[in-house]
Image (tube, helix red, strand yellow):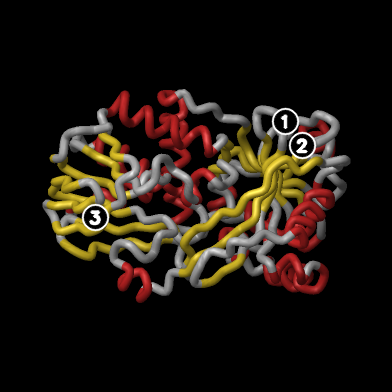
């Protein structure tokens, strides 16, 4: 447990955005502390796929955030000893309209480095893939086990970069240079607040005015009866009809209309498919999206069935055994990020589109700059 109480900058929240902000502040040479209300990170940052993705991010600034974040992740994983389980992403076009979206995407700047795999190449790399109208391959993605990567990242920031961590210490209020916690006062000229999906403790009026809601999702870990190897993340038409980088294309309208006719129940529950693999051979599969003013504490088998049904449409997998279920929650709004400076020296920031792991390091740099008035 850290004992110093004075720092240049204090980060509130030890999720991936908070850790990224701490890293960005240390890169500027600042003395940094991270204060976390729980004994460890237990929020959206460890309940996701561990899927760092560039392809499909909203075109423009957010896509650039993802590119920058992917660049920093490559540096960090090597230094922090975080295992990258696989790289790249494969989108199977189950419908001709999905292939049209892929072709249109490749004509944009966001398609740089991506390509449509030939039939022989797809069969070689993904022999378990169901037939379709083409496979879009992106080399930009990487996958880590979030529940292992986040603690390791925090330990590395502490050991290698001298970041002080205060766990089990809720922050009750900020009036710089004082940060009032449940166990006393810390002092800093600057603060970066990364509340995750806690919208009611610090600056709740501002977050309410920003019309930020909560999104609850269902996730599964399944173990195939027969061993299989995914070389990268696997996604489907539902992702092409959901991700901003694709839906902004004119060709996406026909695909969305067809899915609305053929898979209306999936759309009603915000279900699309991401499948990634863990070191033990299990697959992390999801997810659904339910929006409201609070978390949804109850999970439904029917939604799990929708997710697994889509998995079977994309991969030839039999006799799957569900070994783990969980719910995730993240802040959501019409925009993909929210950031503001409620007082001199204070920056508040949330990634509000479910892309925290993919855009964290770039957004952390933005928040530190905002707190410093840069």
**Position of 248 relative to 26 (above/below):** below
Helix, strand or loop at mark 1: loop
Asked whether 4 or 76 is in front, the reply is 4
* Residue positioned 50% across, 58% down in the render: 330
* Foreground residue among 78 and 305: 305
Of marks 2 and 3, which one's residue comes earlier in the chain? 2
Give residue 325's mark.
none
Left or right: 39 in relation to 322: left
Q: Position of residue 50 (x, y in %)?
A: 56, 41
Mark on residue 370? 3
Cα–Cα span, label 2 and label 3 = 44 Å
Q: Quadrant of residue 281?
A: top right
| Gap in angstroms between the C-alphas marked 3 and 1 | 42 Å
Q: Is residue 19 left or right of residue 110?
A: left
Real-space CA distance between mark 1 and mark 2, rounded to the nearest whole angstrom: 7 Å
Q: Contact (CB < 8 A) between labels 1 and 2?
A: yes
Q: Is residue 49 left or right of residue 317?
A: left
Which residue is painted at 75% across and 30% down in the image? 229
The residue identified by callout 1 is 281
Q: Is residue 274 visible?
A: no
Residue closest to the eye, 148 or 86 = 148
């Amino acid at each position: 447990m850290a004992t110093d109480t004075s720092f240049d900058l204090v980060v509130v929240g030890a999720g991936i955005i908070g850790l990224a902000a701490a890293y960005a502040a240390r890169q500027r040479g600042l003395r940094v502390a991270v204060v976390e209300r729980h004994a460890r990170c237990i929020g959206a940052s460890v309940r996701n796929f561990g899927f760092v993705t560039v392809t499909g991010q909203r075109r423009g600034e957010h896509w650039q955030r993802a590119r920058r974040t992917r660049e920093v992740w490559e540096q960090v994983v090597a230094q922090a000893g975080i295992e990258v389980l696989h790289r790249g992403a494969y989108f199977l076009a189950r419908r001709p309209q999905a292939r049209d979206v892929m072709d249109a995407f490749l004509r944009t700047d966001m398609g740089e480095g991506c390509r449509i795999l030939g039939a022989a190449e797809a069969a070689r790399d993904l022999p378990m893939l169901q037939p379709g109208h083409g496979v879009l391959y992106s080399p930009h993605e990487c996958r880590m086990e979030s529940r292992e990567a986040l603690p390791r990242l925090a330990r590395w920031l502490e050991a290698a970069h001298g970041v002080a961590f205060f766990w089990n210490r809720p922050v009750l209020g900020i009036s710089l240079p004082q940060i009032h916690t449940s166990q006393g006062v810390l002092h800093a000229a600057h603060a970066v607040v990364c509340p995750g999906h806690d919208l009611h403790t610090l600056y709740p009026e501002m977050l309410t005015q920003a019309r930020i809601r909560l999104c609850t999702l269902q996730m599964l870990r399944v173990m195939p009866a027969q061993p299989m190897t995914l070389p990268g993340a696997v996604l489907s038409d539902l992702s092409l009809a959901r991700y901003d980088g694709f839906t902004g294309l004119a060709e996406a309208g026909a695909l969305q209309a067809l899915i609305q006719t053929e898979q209306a129940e999936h759309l009603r529950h915000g279900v699309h498919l991401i499948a990634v693999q863990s070191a033990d051979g299990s697959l992390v599969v999801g997810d659904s999206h339910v929006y409201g003013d609070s978390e949804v504490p109850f999970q439904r088998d029917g939604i799990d069935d929708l997710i697994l049904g889509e998995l079977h449409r994309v991969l030839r997998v039999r006799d799957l055994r569900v070994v783990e279920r969980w719910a995730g929650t993240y802040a959501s709004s019409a925009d993909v990020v929210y950031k503001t400076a409620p007082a001199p020296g204070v920056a508040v920031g949330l990634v509000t589109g479910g892309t925290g792991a993919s855009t964290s390091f770039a957004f952390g740099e933005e928040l530190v700059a905002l707190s410093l008035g840069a």
